[in-house]
Image (spheres, helix red, strand yellow):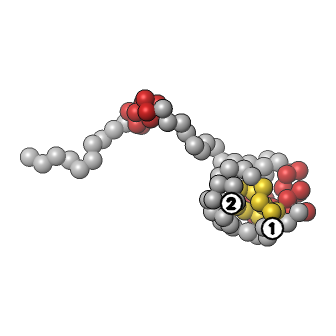
Amino acid sequence: MTKPLLSRRTPAQFSSNLRAAGATAVRSLKPRTFTLQQVEEASGMQAGYCLACGSMQECCEPDARQYCCDNCQQNEVYGAEELLLMGRVN
């Protein structure tokens, strides 16, 4: 009889293993949103925001998508107007 390739674990078992190892969550499951004031300011400065870390990125076109963030090095920077179109403004 052969062993299954992957053992079936519940999400609770995975999270208990992470807690035991001292790991913490890096990113929330809730999508990052920005205020209208933040987006208006970024629009006037030709800037955008990183969806991964939330930092403002300068020299960013209004329709920018997936630019590299100087802060966290992820391709998650979007231009101000693009954030509006994506529904990321509250």
- Category of crowding for the residue at label 1, using alpha-carbon neighbours closer than 10 angstroms: few (below 14), some (14–19), many (at least 20): few
Whether residue 15 is visible to the viewer of this picture, yes or no, is: no
Secondary structure of residue under mark 2: loop
Q: Left or right: 51 with respect to 44?
A: left
In front of the other: 50 or 84? 50
- Which residue does the numbered mark 2 point to in the structure image? 69
Query: For the residue marked with disc 2, what is the amino acid?
Result: Cys
- Which residue does the numbered mark 1 point to in the structure image? 59
Residue at (30, 41) in percent of width and height: 8
Secondary structure of residue under mark 1: loop
Circle number at residue 21: none
Q: Is residue 15 above or below residue 48?
A: above
Residue at (27, 42) in percent of width and height: 7
Residue 12 in picture, x, y percent from top left: 42, 32
Whether residue 13 is visible to the viewer of this picture, yes or no, is: yes
Q: Picture quarter containing residue 67?
A: bottom right
Q: Picture quarter containing residue 25?
A: top right
Residue 42 in picture, x, y percent from top left: 85, 59
